[in-house]
Image (spheres, rainbow, N blue to C red):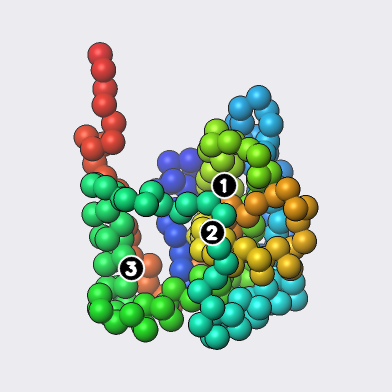
Amino acid sequence: MDVYEAVQSRQSIRAFSDHPVSRNILDRVLTAAVRTPSGGNLQPWHIYVLSGDRLAELKKRISERVACGDSGDEREFAFYPPQLGSPYRERLADMGARRYGALGIGVDDTQARARVRAENWNGFGASTVLFCYLDRDMPAPQWADAGMFLQTVMLLLRAEGLHSCTQIAWAEYHRSVNEVISPPNERILFCGMSIGYANPASTHPSIPRAPLTETVTFLE
């Protein structure tokens, strides 16, 4: 698979089969991903990969909190700007409409939407979830470096026939994640990434991207 095909075929999969992911594949992907560029070669990402009993325990802890109506921990960073302006507000709304619309869930069906959203903390059925932490004192450029690392991982996973879904939703229950992983106190959870094989019985709606004219300006 060449890099263009990997980019075109990558999408956020939200229904995985329970087929396990080979440790050899994960080692190969993560070893190659360390070539991701980072400012000053800081390589600020700290990665934890959970599977088996450890992942099952994390899923159980969060599912129990969700079932009790626990909406999560105090946010340690903003997920979106407090006032999301145009065109970002419209893009977010369109994504939600496509995501829930593909499942036949209406805008006002809050209970059904909540049940679907809760699948985030089941890893959408994935057998492996990667968690990305950074040191708390790292500024925005190092968070961007971590994003480049995660994108590199996702493209390499496609080359191995695997899919993924990055989920900032795990940070909503960062206390439970920390209890299972036990990272040093100076690290903050950025996001999780569910990894596995797409469930062939499920549909995965394509989310369109903005045309180049909206996001790129050529100055000649």
Residue name at image x 25 percent, y 75 percent: 107
Say what secondary structure mark 2 lies in: loop
Disc 1 residue type (three-letter): Leu
Report how far apart the C-alphas of labels 3 and 2 lie in the structure: 24 Å
Q: Badge 2, how many Cα within 10 Å: few under 14, some, many 20+?
A: few
Residue name at image x 66 percent, y 78 percent: 61
Disc 3 residue type (three-letter): Arg
Q: Which residue is mark 3?
A: 99
Q: Which mark is residue 39?
A: none
Q: Which image quarter: residue 17?
A: bottom right
Query: Seen in the image, is 51 located left or right of residue 16?
Result: right
User: Exactly how many numbered labels are in the figure?
Assistant: 3
Query: Seen in the image, is 185 located left or right of residue 219?
Result: right
Q: Nearer the viewer, residue 182 or 69?
A: 69
Q: Badge 1, how many Cα within 10 Å: few under 14, some, many 20+?
A: many
In the rendered image, residue 110, in percent from the top left (x then y), is placed at: 33, 80
- Regarding residue 160, the answer to whether it shows in the image is no
Compared with 65, 32 (above or below) is above
Front position among marks 2 and 1: 2
Disc 2 residue type (three-letter): Arg
- Regarding residue 59, the answer to whether it shows in the image is yes
Dot 2 or dot 1: first in sequence order is 2
Dot 3 or dot 2: first in sequence order is 2
Front position among marks 3 and 2: 2
In the rendered image, residue 47, in percent from the top left (x then y), is placed at: 69, 51
Q: Which residue is mark 1?
A: 150
Q: Which residue is mark 2?
A: 75
Asked whether disc 1 touches disc 3, contact meaning CB atoms under 8 Å apart, the reply is no
Which quarter of the rendered picture does the C terminus lie within?
A: top left
In the rendered image, residue 199, in percent from the top left (x then y), is placed at: 49, 73
Residue name at image x 51 percent, y 82 percent: 69
Extreme-top residue of the structure: 220
